[in-house]
């Protein structure tokens, strides 16, 4: 373990050099724009709840930034994914293909819509759903019927596919989109971590029917809490808006609701914070790109693998990650760095290991397991002083 000891010593020095003293979190928000002003304006306007100009503005900002035609604001990213899946047609007893290596919210949203996750392996380099594994799974387990793709083994319909762009690194989304189209499986991208990440000039989340962002406090920009569904389909956007706003039939004063809807609209207060953060997004992305370069050269000089995007991607560098040689080294690195008040974190426990998803169908998950044993996230916040107050 001397190698890890040496590495931790140098890691401690560079972390203190970049982030200063005291406890160093993995990712903290920065409020150097119009956050305070917009919050005060919002309170003064009396529109603090789920109706207000900032909610609409937030939708327009996200649509403009991502190039999607429509955006529907929600109360958080999990709610956004729940509704996106419901709009995609996921109903009780349907299967939804996703990855075992993801944050639990992806699978919780599948469950809220009555779906049952099926866990397919990820690619080692992207840490996101593998098109090769997806194709293999469908070819050996699925059949096409007039109603879409069905799982021959379980007798269930495969109603959607939800890849996730891990830590902002795009997965091979164009290939996944092609396979989904071939099998008539609606593609819903979980882009909670990839705002600011593009593939071949196209923003992640614009490759399928819809995609969902999160504006939680730990994401690249925050609304305190919030989410967003983006889509190029007017019908998907209309239905998503309807379901997230109690499914109320538009009328000046009467209360008629035409289905079971949800109170999932983003409050104007959160949108006010979110709009100010969206104004800062480009500046934040630029600082994070510099930080990632710094980490990259530090680790590559020490023969430690630093996770980089695949070709033709522009990434947001939301959370930087390294790949250590084995689980023992990972554990040693995590223990020693956290003891020194520098937050580092392993990747998530695979979803099929969690009690509620332990009976879900999986493929071999070889790469997922390999990554789970080795990946560590390192501090990725905008350093103090790196961004100027506007
Ligand atoms: C953060 C996150 C979500 C959920 O977002 P919330 O706004 O916290 O509900 C969903 N999926 C992934 C991959 C995430 O990282």
Image: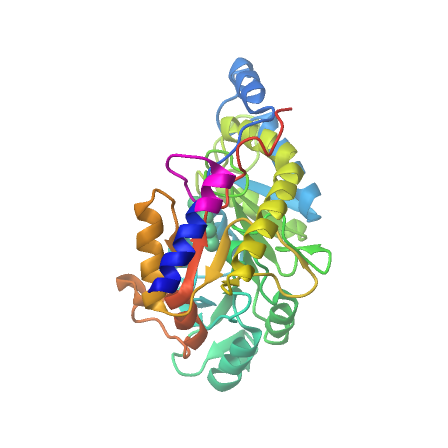
Residue 55 percent location from the top left of the image: 58, 32
Name the residue rendered at 41%, 34% in the picture.
21
Quarter of the image for residue 111 reads bottom left
Quarter of the image for residue 23 reads top left
Res 273 seen here: yes
Which residue is farthest right? 201
Q: How many marks?
A: 0
For this rendering, which residue is in front, 43 or 128? 128
Please state, as top left, top right, bottom left or bottom right, where the C terminus lies in the image: top right
Residue 247 percent location from the top left of the image: 49, 42
Q: Is residue 59 left or right of residue 166?
A: right
Q: How was this image coloured?
A: rainbow
Give the residues drawn in magenta, as a range: 13-27
Was residue 75 drawn as part of the magenta stretch in this picture?
no
In the displayed structure, would residue 344 be above or below residue 278? below
Name the residue rendered at 33%, 65% in the picture.
1
Residue 88 percent location from the top left of the image: 54, 59
Res 260 seen here: no
Q: Is residue 182 left or right of residue 383?
A: right
In the displayed structure, would residue 119 be above or below residue 330? below
Which residue is farthest top? 44
Name the residue rendered at 51%, 38% in the picture.
248
Residue 58 percent location from the top left of the image: 61, 34
Which residue is farthest bottom? 140
């Amino acid at each position: 373990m001397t190698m890890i000891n040496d590495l931790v010593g140098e890691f401690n020095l560079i972390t203190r050099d970049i982030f200063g003293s005291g406890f160093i979190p993995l990712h903290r928000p920065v409020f150097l724009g119009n956050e305070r002003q917009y919050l005060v304006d919002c309170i003064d306007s009396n529109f603090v709840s789920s109706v207000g100009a900032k909610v609409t503005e937030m939708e327009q900002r996200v649509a403009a930034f991502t190039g999607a035609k429509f955006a529907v604001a929600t109360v958080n990213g999990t709610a956004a994914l729940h509704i996106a899946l419901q709009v995609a047609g996921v109903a009780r007893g349907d299967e939804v293909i996703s990855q075992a290596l993801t944050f639990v919210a992806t699978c919780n949203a599948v469950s809220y819509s009555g779906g049952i996750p099926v866990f397919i392996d990820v690619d080692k380099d992207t840490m996101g759903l593998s098109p090769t594994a997806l194709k293999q799974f469908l070819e050996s387990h699925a059949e096409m019927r007039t109603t879409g793709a069905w799982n021959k083994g379980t007798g269930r319909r495969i109603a959607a596919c939800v890849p996730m762009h891990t830590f902002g690194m795009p997965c091979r989304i164009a290939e996944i989109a092609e396979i989904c189209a071939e099998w008539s499986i609606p593609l819903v991208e979980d882009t909670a971590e990839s705002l600011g990440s593009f593939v071949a000039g196209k923003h992640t989340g614009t490759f399928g029917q819809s995609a969902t962002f999160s504006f939680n406090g730990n994401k690249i920009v925050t609304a305190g809490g919030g989410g967003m569904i983006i889509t190029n389909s007017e019908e998907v956007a209309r239905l998503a808006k309807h379901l997230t706003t109690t499914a109320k039939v538009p009328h000046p004063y009467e209360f008629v609701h035409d289905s079971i809807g949800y109170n999932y609209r983003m409050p104007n207060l959160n949108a006010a914070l979110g709009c100010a953060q969206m104004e800062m997004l480009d500046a934040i992305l630029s600082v994070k790109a510099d930080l990632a370069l710094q980490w990259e050269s530090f680790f590559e000089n020490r023969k430690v693998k630093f996770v980089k995007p695949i070709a033709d991607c522009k990434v947001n560098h939301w959370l930087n990650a390294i790949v250590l040689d084995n689980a023992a080294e990972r554990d040693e690195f995590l223990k020693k760095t956290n003891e020194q008040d520098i937050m580092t974190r392993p990747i998530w426990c695979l979803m099929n290991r969690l009690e509620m998803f332990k009976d879900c169908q999986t493929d071999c998950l070889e790469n997922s397991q390999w990554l789970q044993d080795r990946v560590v996230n390192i501090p990725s916040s905008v350093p103090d002083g790196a961004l100027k107050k506007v």
